């Protein structure tokens, strides 16, 4: 009897749908906030471990009829739609490349009509928690925001380009529009709905394949489906909820794929380049958040990181599980993975008034988990002695002493750089203040001016892309970029040293308090002004991390560490990393030397000394340090890798190959080890093995120049001229333009504040305009 009721309900749902009767649901409101949804249909989950329900012959027949009818309608609609849009479509890059300059592709022939995608409200009927989070998240607002549309409209209105070029941007921001042939002149398609929805549920959950980690939406979109039949074949379009609730496992088979849990899925859009078809110039890397993650400690794919950690994916940080407050049939034990994708965008929720999204984003950014700020040490004018680490060593100060404070900022727990993407628009910077005991300001760097603009001499984590005329590329007109004059960020797992100089007041009594904090704002004030006008409200500034220290007049004794301070050995280690990156090799070796004094059994301490001396070309002492590291930990892949470099330098080819082979065996996705092993085989005339390594490297990083260059030679040697020409062309396109430094220099000449920032060891000071370089280690 119960089976009969199931069949009756299912058949009734099918008949209603065939007659055009769809579930009642609210239309999305473009005003801030989430639209209300129809209450979900009744559903009683089966016990865990219970087998899927078997279809009766009548149910199978009903589903088969539904599937046949749905496929017929889809094909007829798609054929009619293509007949309508194709004749007037601008095939700027030829009929075989309708979606260039984006990399998105679609299943089947021709364009896919936007009506083929089930709406977000349809999905939200059963997934109300996920829907409410998505509605306030950046993904659902990927196209409609004025911040995005200002930039893309400049491209569309560009006299030498136009809307066809915007497919490069919209392939990620609005793939339904791109695949639906709407990005063409005089499009007759009503875009209102999918423009306002951006990335809907069924854009991500309809992806059926990843082309590679090329970025620019390197995905293959399947015909949207929310369920498969008992044979695993996809049924296109919306189906009655009863069908899904009776077979939730078939729903999962249609909308969930293993790659959705992998960083490579995020890489499809969170890695981007500016290809020649966009800029009529050449390949330029735009942002590489995926590559940065892959090279971080969290991927466990790179043996050369300074620190190690448990594996963490993009999803593990940005889609943490949270308790549901609304009905959601996808919940497990009362939780779902977050569909807010909390990250760095505070501008969109602030603009639309999405208060919950903004609150959670600020909490995410300000949690204190990601950066460590260390007021590490001081130098007094007239002395080269570094008094450090503060809190561990005694020192004395007198009124009128000129003090140089060293601040070390560690990218401790971010799986990519700070800032990872479009850092010409984001704003993160160091604010450094010195105040006396009465609170009077003695020195201030990194302040916001009355008009909201950032102090131009602030230490900021940003970049300055420039045109071939050396002009700053404002408003994110990325197709005009020819060079990057300045690019400052903190890579994952690394540190930066920032120096500040100020005089102690002559009349100071007691002490001064120095505070260093890293602030963040989305977006850059000048960009906000360009988009919204100068009279817009102040956008949120979030403190990511901070640290204060009291500097007393007279004697300063060691003091107890705070809970969030790094241990002493790590403080020295982070200083060494930052000095290494600033090309101050002797000072870096000294800092790493302090690490091994504090932790004589720490193999990486000696490895850090060795790698610094390799870069410094002190090969004999580097050999001693690497040997010491290997004596402590013979299985250290880092030490083995640098030992391979030293064996190559000494001409010991067999040992060199053995070292790199061992690292590749331990870390098959190590870009550096694959590259060096390929070079070793190439230099040893072992072409087949060299080919194998460079091909593997290219799968890991399709943009690797060494792979392109060496493969072009190897293919030519092997009598494969077509493959050789292809690799040579990619090498020529992706290598840096020799003229690019000229464009950068033109900009830096006209912007001394940025020119000074571009000097790694510069000092922030109101006392002088020139910057002193290091005396040693150059």
Image (spheres, helix red, strand yellow):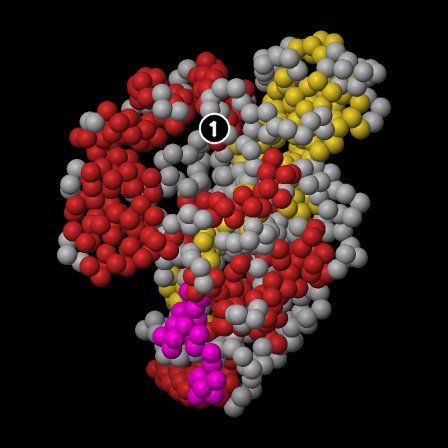
Q: Report the front residue among 86 and 143.
A: 86
Q: Quadrant of residue 663?
A: top left
- 708 lies above or below 388: below
Question: In which quadrant of the rendered image does the N terminus lie?
Answer: bottom left
Magenta segment: does it hold 94?
yes
Residue 103 screen position, x and y as percent:
42, 65
Compared to residue 723, the image places residue 404 above or below, namely above
Majority secondary structure in the magenta region = loop
Counting the numbered discs, the total is 1
Q: Is residue 225 visible?
A: no
Q: Position of residue 329 (x, y in %)?
A: 54, 64
In the picture provided, is 485 more to the left or to the right than 723? right
For the question of whether residue 685 can be seen, the reply is yes
Comparing 131 with 328, the one in front is: 131
Please report the residue visible at 34 percent of the width from the left and 53 percent of the height from the top.
732
Q: Secondary structure at mark 1?
A: loop
Where is residue 188, by image quadrant? bottom right
Rendered location of residue 305, percent (x, y): 42, 34
Tell me what residue is drawn at x 48 percent, y 45 percent. Answer: 741
Q: Residue furthest bottom?
A: 19
Residue drawn where x is 78% and y is 26% of the image: 442
Who is closer to the viewer here, 537 or 753?
Answer: 753
Left or right: where 475 falls relative to 505: left
Q: Is residue 217 left or right of residue 39?
A: left
What is the span of residues highlighted in magenta in the rendered image?
Answer: 82-105
Residue 478 in percent (x, y) is at: 54, 58
Q: Residue at x 51, y 80 (%)?
A: 115
**Is residue 454 rendered magenta in the image?**
no
Q: Is residue 69 above or below residue 319?
A: below
Residue at the disc numbered 1: 583
Question: Foreground residue, 311 or 386?
Answer: 386
Label 1: few (<14), some or many (≥20) within 10 Å?
some
């Amino acid at each position: 009897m119960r089976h009969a009721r199931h069949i009756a309900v299912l058949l009734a749902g099918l008949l209603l749908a065939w007659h055009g009767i769809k579930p009642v649901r609210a239309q999305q409101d473009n005003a801030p906030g989430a639209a209300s949804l129809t209450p979900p249909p009744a559903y009683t989950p089966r016990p865990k471990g219970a087998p899927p329900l078997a279809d009766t012959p009548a149910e199978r027949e009903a589903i088969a009829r539904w599937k046949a009818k749905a496929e017929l309608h889809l094909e007829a609609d798609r054929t009619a739609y293509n007949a309508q849009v194709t004749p007037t479509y601008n095939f700027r890059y030829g009929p075989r490349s309708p979606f260039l300059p984006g990399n998105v592709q679609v299943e089947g022939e021709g364009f896919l009509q936007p009506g083929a995608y089930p709406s977000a409200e349809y999905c939200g009927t059963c997934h109300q928690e996920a829907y409410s989070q998505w509605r306030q998240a950046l993904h659902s607002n990927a196209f409609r925001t004025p911040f995005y549309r200002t930039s893309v409209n400049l491209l569309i209105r560009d006299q030498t380009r136009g809307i066809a070029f915007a497919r490069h941007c919209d392939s990620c921001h609005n793939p339904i529009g791109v695949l639906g042939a709407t990005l063409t002149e005089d499009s007759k398609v009503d875009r209102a709905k999918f423009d306002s929805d951006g990335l809907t549920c069924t854009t991500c959950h309809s992806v059926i394949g990843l082309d590679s980690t090329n970025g620019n939406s390197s995905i293959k979109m399947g015909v949207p489906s929310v369920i498969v039949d008992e044979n695993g074949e996809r049924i296109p379009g919306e189906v009655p909820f009863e069908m899904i609730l009776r077979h939730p496992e078939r729903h999962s088979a249609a909308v969930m794929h293993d790659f959705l849990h992998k960083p490579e899925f995020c890489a499809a859009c969170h890695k981007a380049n500016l290809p020649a078809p966009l800029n009529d110039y050449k390949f330029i890397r735009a942002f590489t958040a995926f590559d940065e993650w892959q090279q971080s400690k969290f991927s466990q794919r790179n043996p050369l990181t300074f620190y190690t950690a448990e594996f963490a994916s993009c999803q593990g940080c940005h889609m943490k599980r949270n308790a549901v407050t609304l009905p959601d049939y996808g919940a497990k034990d009362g939780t779902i993975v977050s569909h807010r994708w909390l990250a760095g965008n505070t501008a969109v929720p602030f603009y639309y008034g999405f208060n919950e999204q903004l609150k959670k984003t600020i909490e995410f950014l300000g949690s204190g988990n990601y950066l460590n700020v260390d007021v590490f040490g001081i130098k007094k004018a007239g002395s080269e002695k570094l008094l450090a680490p503060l809190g561990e060593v005694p020192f004395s100060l007198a009124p009128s002493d000129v003090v140089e404070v060293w601040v070390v900022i560690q990218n401790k727990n971010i799986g990519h750089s700070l800032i990872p993407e479009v850092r010409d628009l984001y704003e993160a910077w160091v604010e450094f203040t010195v105040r006396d005991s009465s609170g009077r300001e003695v020195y201030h760097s990194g302040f916001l001016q009355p008009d909201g603009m950032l102090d131009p001499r602030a230490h900021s984590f940003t970049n300055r892309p420039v045109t071939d005329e050396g002009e700053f590329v404002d408003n994110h007109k990325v197709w005009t970029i020819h060079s990057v004059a300045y690019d400052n960020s903190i890579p994952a797992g690394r540190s930066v040293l920032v120096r500040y100089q100020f005089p102690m007041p002559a009349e100071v009594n007691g002490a001064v308090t120095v505070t260093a904090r890293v602030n963040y704002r989305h977006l850059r004030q000048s960009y906000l002004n360009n988009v919204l006008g100068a009279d817009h409200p102040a956008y949120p500034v979030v403190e990511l991390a901070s640290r204060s220290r009291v500097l007393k007049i007279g004697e300063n004794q060691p003091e107890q560490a705070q809970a969030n301070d790094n241990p002493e050995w790590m403080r020295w280690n982070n200083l060494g990393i930052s000095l290494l990156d600033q090309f101050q090799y002797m000072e870096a070796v000294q800092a790493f030397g302090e690490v091994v004094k504090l932790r004589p059994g720490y193999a990486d301490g000696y490895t850090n000394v060795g790698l610094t001396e390799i870069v410094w070309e002190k090969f004999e002492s580097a050999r001693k340090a690497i040997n010491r590291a290997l004596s402590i930990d013979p299985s250290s892949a880092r030490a083995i890798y640098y030992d391979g470099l030293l064996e190559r330098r000494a001409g010991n080819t067999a040992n060199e190959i053995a070292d790199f082979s061992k690292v590749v065996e331990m870390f098959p996705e190590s870009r550096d080890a694959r590259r060096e092993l390929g070079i070793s085989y190439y230099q040893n005339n072992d072409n087949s093995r060299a080919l194998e390594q460079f091909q593997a490297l290219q799968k890991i990083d399709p943009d690797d120049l060494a792979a392109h260059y060496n493969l072009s030679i190897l293919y030519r040697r092997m009598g494969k001229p077509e493959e050789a020409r292809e690799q040579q062309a990619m090498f020529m396109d992706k290598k840096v333009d020799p003229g690019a430094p000229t464009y950068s220099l033109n900009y830096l000449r006209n912007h001394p504040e940025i020119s000074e920032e571009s000097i790694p060891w510069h000092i922030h000071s109101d006392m002088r305009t020139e910057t002193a370089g290091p005396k040693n280690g150059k």
